[in-house]
Image (cartoon, rainbow, N blue to C red):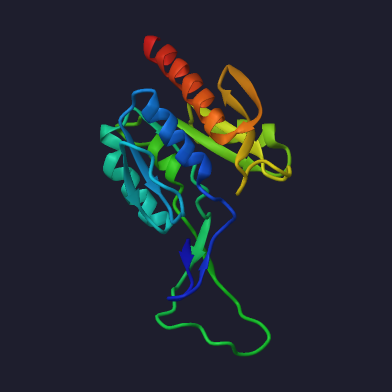
Amino acid sequence: REALDPVRYISNHSSGKMGYALARAAQEAGARVTLISGPVTLTTPDRCQRVNVSSALEMLDAALDVVSDCDIFIASAAVADYRPAAVAEQKIKKSGDEIQLTLVKNPDIVATITSHAERPFTVGFAAETTDVAAYAKGKLARKNLDMIVANDVSQPGIGFNSDDNAVTLYWPDGEQAFAAMSKQALARELILAIAQRYSAVLGD
């Protein structure tokens, strides 16, 4: 959420369900999990440490706080690319038929993590509406990711706010598609695939 004034903000349709499912699946697989979460109505998975944030800047600070103690960083949050240049101290009152907002670019959290001196194995997400594979592969290379999970959020019944999802997992020399299933089942499949790739890279 990016605040406009004390009562309004800019956000998107992401529910956080995929991120929470991944946190639960990672914990079940034996990982020690820190879950950096935006405002959601979801229950914290058992034995996961939750850090609450509201904005992209707060999420970046929280990520940097834990990066040096992190082996695998999974960036599934739907972070706003832009934020209001100024936040009004009081509620913006209705006046006239139009209002203009000036937005400034937010820092790129995942790119900041992949350029960090203590860079962990980093998995990104690409929620797209067109040319999903092309955008995902471009993001994989551009942001120096180890893997990226891509899904088409324009498809009904999967993606934002849904309990189900269908994705393709890409890495520099391979890919794996996952058919539609519950986000919790998908999270377990993804954690297994990420762990296998992480072990392979570590072995290299």
Tell how many labels.
Answer: 0
Residue 175 in percent (x, y) is at: 61, 20
Name which residue lies at 40% across and 14% down.
199
Q: Is residue 117 left or right of residue 95?
A: left
Q: Quadrant of the image for the C terminus?
A: top left
Residue 24, quarter of the rendered image: top left
* Percent position of residue 63, x then y: 34, 44
56 with respect to 95 (left or right): left
Closer to us: 105 or 62: 62
Residue drawn where x is 47% and y is 31% of the image: 123
**Coordinates of residue 195 in the picture (x, y in percent):** 43, 19
Relative to 77, say whether 92 is above or below: below
Please tell me in which quadrant of the rendered image residue 142 appears: top right
Q: Between residue 76 and residue 179, name the one nearer to us.
A: 179
Q: Is residue 30 above or below residue 1?
A: above
Residue in the image at 68% along x and 86% along y: 97
Q: Is there any visible trace of residue 2 in the rendered image?
A: yes
**In which image quadrant can residue 122 be found?**
top left
Report the residue at 44% width, 56% height from top.
Answer: 39
> What percent of the width, then of the height, locates residue 149?
57, 32
Compared with 24, 171 (above or below) is: above
Residue with the most extreme bottom position: 95
Regarding residue 121, the answer to whether it shows in the image is: no
